[in-house]
Amino acid sequence: MLLFTPGPTPIPESIRQAMAIPTLHHRTKEFESYFEFCRIKLIELMNMQDVLMLASSGSGAMEASIRTFCKKPLCINSGKFGERFVKIAKVYNMPFVEILNDWDTAPNSDEIANILKQDNEIDSICIQMCESAGGLRHNVESIAKVAKEINKDIVIIVDAITALGVEEIDTTNIDVLIGGSQKAFMLPPGMAIIGLSGLALDLIDKNDIGFYFNLKTELKNQRKNTTAWTSPTTIIIGLAKYFEIANIKDIYKETKQRAIATRESLKSLNLKIYPKNPALAMTTIYNEDSLKIRKILKEKYYVNIAGGQDKLKDSIFRINHMGIIPINEALWVVNAIELTLNDLNIRKFDGNASKVFLENYFKQG
Ligand SMILES: *Cc1c(COP(=O)(O)O)cnc(C)c1O
């Protein structure tokens, strides 16, 4: 079965082998050297001042960030993950402002500028880089720039769980950049990553908040290449292997080639791309037969892609582009979709999906 869901992603053999070594204790020099290597590589990848690795899924880092950095956040909600920031603020009885949109629609920076100018209590913005609910790319870079021009101390918190390791991120105006192990890093679920700016580091020092997710305690320990609590050792050893095998520049380039080739290929089958501004992490198709398409893909062609969530559960399907993916596998996915449309008498098979995929893939290469 080909696993093509936008997280979790398949783990490469070499990473699985690396993680198979006998258990290392987390308070040893040997483990600390893995930790230090990952810290250096993550800081370099994110181009930020510091980084934290937390034993938790991505949502733990979202919760820790809201608690540590926000008094009144502006939450951008264009899907399940944007909604999650809102839910966290509510749990802590924190005042917030929400921009609620359809899942295919991103707010623009003018709209956000107006809100910030009208409400000077807003001290932070919580936004996804890629809102995975609909595969929507938010224009984080321009929003962050405009927000900082209005208030230089505003904290820009970006859930980049489906953007980190997918594309080069301009972190000039980003203060908190959240990643997760189970997406583009091709690791098991269970570790969150937080990249930090100078402003974020000042706030961590001032705001000594929480217990398990106390970022001040974590930072103090992690700067000594250890963690406050037991480290997710296996995942960190896997991450070290990822940095050994991954040529990041090639991954960015190939991910983009795959994403565009897939998008064009499926458009040539008259399928409709769902988001108005698609992200590179996944291709999302709006189709009322999504449930049937996914069932045939899985049972007949051994391809596992994701459906939607909530209101879009059975009306979209999502194909992953994150990680290192052999081109023949990506090609098989679009071909299998074309075969499936033929099986459902929606469109007669003529091999166009493969043809358009390959034309577009190599055109960019
Ligand atoms: C996968 C994902 C998360 C992480 O959610 P967890 O289940 O807590 O790991 C957060 N944000 C986005 C945009 C995601 O795609």
Image (cartoon, rainbow, N blue to C red):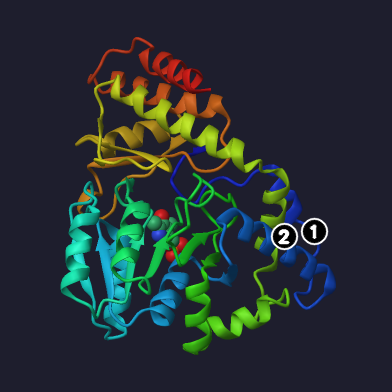
Query: Which residue does the numbered mark 1 point to in the structure image?
Result: 21
Classify residue 238 as left or right of residue 292. Answer: right
**Image location of residue 137, percent across then percent down:** 34, 47
Mark 1 near ligand 1 (CB under 8 Å)?
A: no
In the image, residue 192 sits, relative to residue 303, either above or below, namely below
Relative vertical location of residue 228 with respect to residue 234 in this rendering, above or below: below
Residue 232 appears in view: yes
- Mark positioned earlier in the residue sequence (1 or 2): 1
Residue that appears at 73% across and 66% down:
36
Location of residue 73 by image quarter:
bottom left
Q: Nearer the viewer, residue 116 or 25?
A: 116
Horizontal relation, residue 317 to residue 201: left or right: left
Q: Which residue is mark 2?
A: 237
Label 1 vs label 2, nearer the camera: 2
Callout 2: helix, strand or loop? helix
**In the image, residue 220 lies at what x, y percent?**
64, 83
**Badge 1 density bin: few <14, some 14–19, many ≥20, Cα 10 Å:** few
On screen, residue 44 versus residue 279, left or right, reads right
Identify the amino acid type marked 2. Ile
The residue that appears at 23% across and 46% down in the rendered structure is: 104
Residue 280 location (% of width, % of height): 41, 40
Query: In the picture, residue 84 is in which quadrant?
Result: bottom left
Q: Nearer the viewer, residue 197 or 126?
A: 197
Neighbour class for label 2 at 10 Å: few (<14), some, many (≥20)?
many
Q: Residue at x 43, y 33 (%)?
A: 259
Dot 1 and dot 2 residues touching (CB under 8 Å): yes
